[in-house]
Image: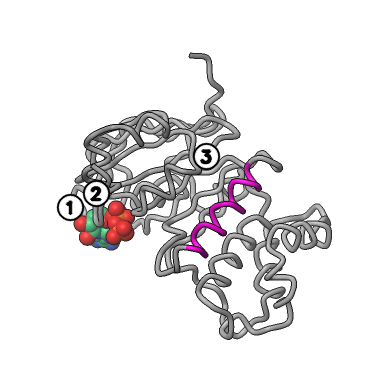
Amino acid sequence: TERKWLLRVNNIEVVYQDIIQVLRGVSINIPEGRITALLGPNGAGKTTTLRAISGLLVPEDGAVRDGTIVYQGREIQNLPPEQIVKLGIVQVPEGRHVFKHLTVEENLRVGSITRRDGKVREDLERIYHYFPRLADLRHRLAGYTSGGEQQMLAIGRALLAAPKLLLLDEPSLGLAPLLVREIFDIVARINAEEGVTVLVVEQNAAIALAVSDYAYIMEQGKIVLEGEAEALKENPDVKEFYLGTA
Ligand code: ATP
């Protein structure tokens, strides 16, 4: 099928400390304007894959040893993270990392630091439109908001960097099911209304398959299965091992 790929990860190998091979030839294609999920158990290499894409592997610690990462037709596997952000690839890290001693709005403004187009006020209002809770809390110190609100804040902050490709690392982590649903629904709206392409890493396969178009399943540093989300939901192995519904 004819698709426009925003990002193509081709057979990458990632090694930590020169000897620990964590990714063993991983290939992932991300179609423009869609939501793609990367699923798999703890330690499979999902976060490492996101870091390879966003340039957030620490050079002395981990490196893409082989393979290419092609974004909008350009190889980026050797670019520093600040350049990758400017190209429009923005990662929301696992565990959120908001600045606890800044207010919610100050945290959001940090996300706009790489911008020069002066549209920050407008964008803040857009983020408050998607996350009304953040609007209510805009003057509160981030350290005094809940885990779910901090996750919203981390996503909102990433959006202020005007991403074309948003990388989400386990947005469901530690959150109550209803809140997880709310956050994923908002992500789906942002994708539909703003055209932001999303790659989401999740251990919660049920929620990720509910909102994504296509998914990859990773185990021990390799992609072991991929397909349309609708089809994967019906796959017997996925049902047994990832959805617990077999
Ligand atoms: P999780 O959901 O737990 O984050 P994951 O699928 O994202 O799992 P990674 O965090 O990518 O997995 O880790 C993959 C493997 O690489 C694990 O075995 C982990 O212990 C190892 N690893 C991660 N970071 C490093 C590092 N800096 N140095 C050495 N090994 C590492």
Q: Is residue 117 left or right of residue 165?
A: right
Dot 3 falls on a residue whose secondary structure is strand
Query: Looking at the picture, does residue 92 appear above or below residue 148?
Result: above
Say which amino acid is labelled 1. Answer: Ile
Q: Is residue 23 left or right of residue 32?
A: left
Q: Which mark is residue 76?
A: none
Mark 2 surroundings: few (<14), some (14-19) or many (≥20) residues within 10 A = some
Which quadrant holds residue 204?
bottom left
Residue under label 3, please give it: 35
Mark 3 surroundings: few (<14), some (14-19) or many (≥20) residues within 10 A = many
Number of numbered tags placed on the structure image: 3
- Residue at point 28% right, 50% down? 45
- Residue reaching furthest to the front: 246
Query: Looking at the picture, does residue 96 appear above or below residue 12?
Result: below
| Magenta stretch, residue numbers | 178-191
Say which amino acid is labelled 3. Answer: Ile
Quadrant location of ligand 1?
Answer: bottom left
Point out the tag, 3 or 1, that comes first from the N-terminus: 1
Say which amino acid is labelled 2. Answer: Val
Point out the tag, 2 or 3, that comes first from the N-terminus: 2
Looking at mark 2, is its residue's CB closer than 8 Å to ligand 1? no
Dot 2 falls on a residue whose secondary structure is strand
Dot 1 falls on a residue whose secondary structure is strand
Magenta span main SS: helix
Q: Which mark is residue 20?
A: 1
Residue under label 2, please give it: 15
- In the rendered image, residue 181 lying in the magenta stretch gets the answer yes
Q: CA distance from mark 2 to mark 1?
A: 5 Å
Tell me the quadrant of the picture where the C terminus can be found. top left
Mark 1 surroundings: few (<14), some (14-19) or many (≥20) residues within 10 A = few
- Residue reaching furthest to the left: 19
Q: x and y percent of residue 231 in the render?
A: 37, 29
